[in-house]
Image: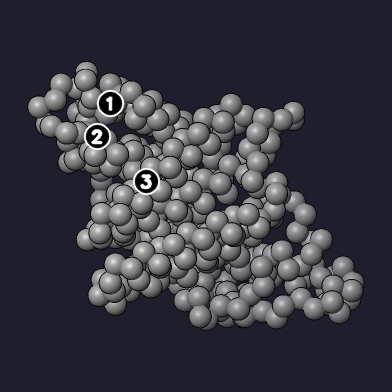
Amino acid sequence: MASCQQQSNLYVVQGLNILAWLELGHGNDTSGWIFTSMAGAMVVHQGLHIQADPSPADRSAGPEHSSESHERARTFWSFFWVNRLAAAVLGRATLLPKNQVKVPPLSAFGTTTTAIEDACLDSLCQLWTLHDQHMEPILSFDFPTLDASKKDAVLRTARLALTQFYDSVDARLRTTSSSSPPLLPSPFYFQISYHVSLILLNRPFLHSTPQPTFSSALHAMGVAASAITDLLQRFRIQHSAKDVPPFMIYHVLRAVTVLLLLATSSLSSTSKPPQHRPNSWLSARLKLCLEFLEDAGQTWRERSDCAVRAVQELAVRWNVVWALPRRWSGVVVACGTGSSLSDGCAEQR
């Protein structure tokens, strides 16, 4: 820690960010949060959270100046992404409130952002910034006091903003069709994140809302979960799930939760025989998600195992074990306290 403070530079922030990413991925939540907190302190110490927009003069000042400005912005947004992920998984607030951050997006640096990985990072950061902006009034204490029409207007405005943002991102991130050579995984990561954002945005409207809004929110969540499973199926054709980053486990768990929720709504009677329930569509998609989590466990074992156990626990709690594929419908072992994937606090984000 003393060395980090005495030799504070971009490489220190990047190194702490990588350590936080690895610790969170392997289920070491406390260590992961410590590293991302240290990175956040270094970000503030170096002033990375406040940067001027690149002007035309900056872009024409030469590659050295442009590269330095771009690297500072890229270091900040990399920290932002890991910290945002950690906050979601652990159910905590981000270290830097959005009103204390003024950093241009990576796309503002023009030709310096050419790689699809940079475009993906930039779009993911802007996606979750926009998501948090619209979730803030929904999660406020004043929101429950609004009348139904105002709540519905908030939801429609948020959906429209996300849709317009999706249509504006790099075209390379909006295609996942088969090609030769195979596509990089970045488009899959971005599109799945986009649909998870829609799930989280609509979820608060399932509680104490008029029937039309409830039905609209549930339908939107079902469409998003279905889209995620379609993306997972196409992803597995071109890539291996064992190579995915750990946040994909969190995202897939969000989709599985919605599928289980749809299973509860398909039950008209608890006495209805399982063989007559409309479970083939759900079971096929749940099987795809659970297989994906299992494959991801080759790299992120602790996180993957806890996600699968969380699915089993939820199925038991909601009395929809029948919807799980036979392989995962057996004895459920409680998820350990060391992981927060199924915590109620994490669900708020």
In the picture, measured across the screen, residue 61 lies left or right of residue 227, that is right
Per the image, the residue denoted by label 1 is 278
In the picture, measured across the screen, residue 162 lies left or right of residue 336, that is right
Q: Along the polypeptide, which appears first: circle 3 or circle 2?
A: 3
* Circles 1 and 2 in contact, beta carbons < 8 Å: yes
Q: Along the polypeptide, which appears first: circle 1 or circle 2?
A: 2
Report the colour scheme.
one colour
SS assignment at label 3: helix
Q: Is residue 233 visible?
A: yes
User: Cα distance, mark 3 to mark 2?
Assistant: 13 Å
Looking at the image, which residue is at 37% across and 46% down? 219
Quick one: which residue is furthest to the left in this view? Answer: 271
Q: On screen, 330 above or below 9?
A: above
Q: Residue 192: x percent and y percent? A: 51, 45
Per the image, the residue denoted by label 3 is 219
Looking at the image, which residue is at 30% across and 54% down? 212
User: Cα distance, mark 1 to mark 3?
Assistant: 17 Å
Tag shown at residue 189: none
User: Cα distance, mark 1 to mark 2?
Assistant: 7 Å
SS assignment at label 1: loop
Per the image, the residue denoted by label 2 is 266
- What's under tag 1, amino acid-wise? Pro
Q: Residue 33: x percent and y percent? A: 42, 62
Q: How crowded is mark 1: few (under 14 residues within 10 Å), some or many (20 or more)?
A: few
Looking at the image, which residue is at 25% across and 46% down? 336
Looking at the image, which residue is at 79% across and 61% down? 112
Q: Nearer the viewer, residue 173 or 22?
A: 173
Q: Residue 171: x percent and y percent? A: 70, 49
